[in-house]
Amino acid sequence: MSVQKHLQTLEEESIYIIREVAAQFQKPVLLFSGGKDSITMAHLAKKAFYPAKIPFPFLHIDTGHNFPETIEFRDKLMDELGVELIVRYVQDSIDQNKVKEETGKYASRNSLQTVTLLDAIEELGYDACLGGARRDEEKSRAKERIFSVRDDFGQWDAKMQRPELFQILNGKINFGENVRAFPISNWTEEDVWNYIEREELELPSIYFAHERKMVKRDGSYLAHSSYLNLVESDEIVDKIVRFRTVGDMTCTAAVPSTADTIESVIRENKASKSSERGARIDDKRSESALELRKKGGYF
């Protein structure tokens, strides 16, 4: 199968899933972070309902430690799409004493956003949250179905997943439950980049090689910012880098790179011996770090 035919098959499946979410649920929302996967999701949602507008809002859980380039791009894209953007802030959860700010060298707000997300789902009454998670990213995500049911506490149980034979998606839920839906679950990182190239999608500039002040820590390069708790062993350097995945500035490592076009990024990714999520420091806290967060309600 050619690359273009493969991408067309993936696109058709994703659009089918997005339309099923809109048809089966009363109040869906698309979780948007400003990363390449959620940008791809936004584009697919636009295609799914064109020429009508996207019939659900977008929700961003803002940790306050985002890359400024990502926030700037987010606002620009929302204006272009003409969709409603709802933002909920982790800082509010901290101020309300619902979560406690981490301290120390590896402090991050990444896990704290679970509480903010669950509060937003309950407050706004969402019964389905569309997200850009993919099965190839991490082993716990490979366990999830397209429609991943969460209980009334927002928790996920890998042993309670529903069968999805013949692309039949069951959106029936009990009161208080909600579903996380993953339209690009079957895509790979390479598929996403090939699709971005084909559709000529714009991305935040941090996805491409640029010179930046970095903190070299434990062999990784983190963007220098006021959010990092610097220690004596940290080394501040100027480096030409790009970010392969985008999360908080405190937990997303960059890769040294000269790839400044989509074509060169694809070529460089193919030659890489490390995984995409290998740059996420928060995933390295334990062997099952992401799965434990997911069981607690993390997306």
Image (spheres, rainbow, N blue to C red):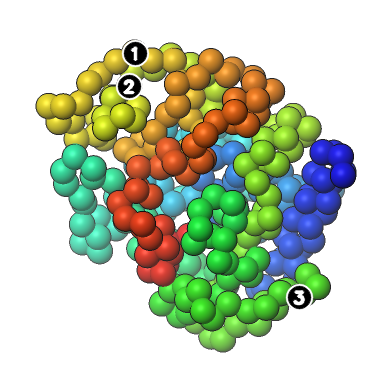
Q: Which numbered tag is attached to residue 60?
A: none
Q: How far apart are marks 3 and 2 (CA)?
A: 47 Å
Q: Residues within 10 Å of mark 2 (few under 14, many from 20)?
A: many
| Residue closest to the far bottom | 174
Q: Which of marks 3 and 1 is in front?
A: 3
Q: Earlier in the sequence, mark 1 or mark 2?
A: 2
Q: Distance between the residues labelled 3 and 1?
A: 51 Å
Depth order, front residue of 67/219: 219
Residue 133 as seen in the image, left or right of residue 196 = left
Depth order, front residue of 123/271: 271
Q: Which numbered tag is attached to residue 165?
A: 3
Q: Earlier in the sequence, mark 3 or mark 1?
A: 3
Q: How far apart are marks 1 and 2 (CA)?
A: 6 Å
Q: What element carries label 2?
A: strand
Q: The disc labelled 2 sits on which kind of residue?
A: Met
Which residue carries the number 1 mark?
238
Q: The disc labelled 3 sits on which kind of residue?
A: Leu
Above or below, 193 against 8 in this view is: above
| Residue 197 in view of the camera | yes
Q: Is mark 1 on a helix, strand or loop?
A: strand
Q: Which numbered tag is attached to residue 214?
A: 2
Residue at 62% over, 64% down: 181
Q: From the top left corner, tell me how far across and down residue 46 is, in percent.
A: 75, 47
Q: The disc labelled 1 sits on which kind of residue?
A: Asp
The picture quadrant where one finds residue 28 is bottom right
Circle 1/circle 2 CB separation < 8 Å: yes
Depth order, front residue of 102/83: 102
